[in-house]
Amino acid sequence: MSQWVRSLMTHDEIRTWLEEDRSEQLDRLWARANAVRRENVGDAVHLRGLIEFSNHCVRTCGYCGLNSTNRRIQRYRMTADEILDCAHAAASYGYGTVVMQSGEDYGISALWLADVICRIHRETELAITLSVGERPLDELKRWRDAGADRYLLRFETSNRDLYDRIHPPRAGQDRSDRFELLRQLREIGYETGSGVMIGIPGQTYDDLATDIEWFGRLELDMIGVGPFIPHPAGPTALLPPAEEGQVPNTEQMAYKVVALTRLLCPASNIPSTSALATLNQTEGRELGLQRGANVVMPNCTPTRYRALYDIYPAKACVDETAEQCLHCLRARIASIGRSVGEGRGDSPAYINRLATT
Ligand code: SAH
């Protein structure tokens, strides 16, 4: 029974793979990750329609262009009707899920978002994923009760000091604990996703190997990783790289992390992320899908808002319409001999977890 059998790799083995640069060795890693992906989650590539519905944010994260100290971006918040239009469009394109993502925006009340979730739930068959930052437990529960299925919250890095530097606490509040929040999200019944950025200044190979170990330990249903892309409005650019063993924020490093994540978490859903497509617009998405990933997230945000959701510069697909994204991604998936997934595309890790609890 190869299913559910995860590779047992020690910290040092993971780190050695992250440091590996010989192409014949890496070809072995890609092939193994691709085979484990096929055995456990199949050839279908699930499409998630991404709706970036607000770029307001109370946080001052050093990595992200939406941070509240950035006075240079125009802020927007989509209306409920605009979001519903996007959800209907996503359903008409055959997507099984919408991902509602925003800055950490308390202008979005728990009640308002619960109402939007109810409407999407009532009017479509879509699975609903939220990615709206660190909100209080009662709000997370309310949204789950309203019909939200999944929650994405990257822990960004497992190095606590680095995390505190790049993700400072809000004024007057304690440092945040995303590991604890992830545990709570799972307990409430969300299909739970997390992930990290690769090549944050100050992040070492040991840190990144520990991140990947955490993916396995947390038994995540979804894992999104992507290269860190410096934003001119983010103070992170000012942080010095680690003196020893700084991880580069390269495309190659991102593929290694995708592949190792697949080996450690064989039944999780793993997207080939936009940050990867941003570094290699020609074939970044496809290479991610051939090295362990099984999900892509076509952007459904109305074109007039897209460029304003400026988490990092030169983001892939900012000038395209939702329909263009759909056609482009379908063609890319077909070009590598894969099929487009049907239905909600719950992760086998989650389905298995439900069956055994
Ligand atoms: N407010 C939500 C959503 C943030 S955007 C939250 O905090 O969870 C989603 C993800 O984009 C972040 O979790 C982060 O991992 C990634 N991201 C943000 N800025 C980035 C950058 N400069 N380069 C690469 N990825 C970035």
Image: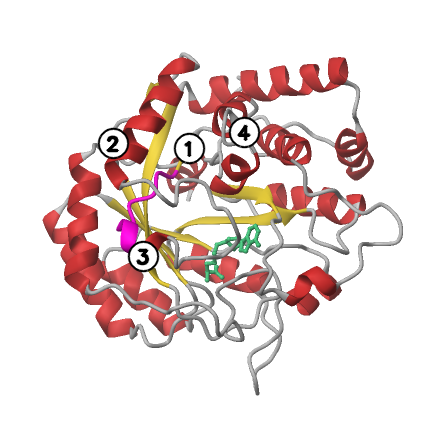
Cα distance in 3D space between marks 1 and 3: 24 Å
What amino acid is at disc 3? Tyr
**Front disc: 2 or 4:** 2
Image side of residue 189 versus residue 304, left or right: right
Residue 273 among those drawn in magenta: no
CB at mark 2 closer than 8 A to ligand 1? no
Q: Which mark is residue 222?
A: none
Q: Secondary structure at mark 4?
A: loop
Query: Residue at (12%, 52%) from the top-left corner?
Result: 122
Q: Which residue is mark 3?
A: 305
Which residue is farthest right?
A: 244
Q: Dots 4 and 3: beta carbons under 8 Å?
A: no
Where does the magenta region start and end? 297-304
Q: Dots 1 and 3: beta carbons under 8 Å?
A: no
Q: Residues within 10 Å of mark 4 (few under 14, many from 20)?
A: many
N-term-proximal mark, 3 vs 2? 3
Give the image location of residue 41, x and y in percent: 44, 24
Give the image location of residue 63, x and y in percent: 60, 60
CB at mark 1 closer than 8 A to ligand 1? no
What amino acid is at disc 4? Pro
Residue 299 among those drawn in magenta: yes
N-term-proximal mark, 1 vs 3? 1
Q: Which residue is mark 2?
A: 343
**Front disc: 3 or 2:** 3
Q: Is residue 89 above or below residue 5?
A: below
Q: Which residue is mark 4?
A: 266
Q: Which mark is residue 295?
A: 1
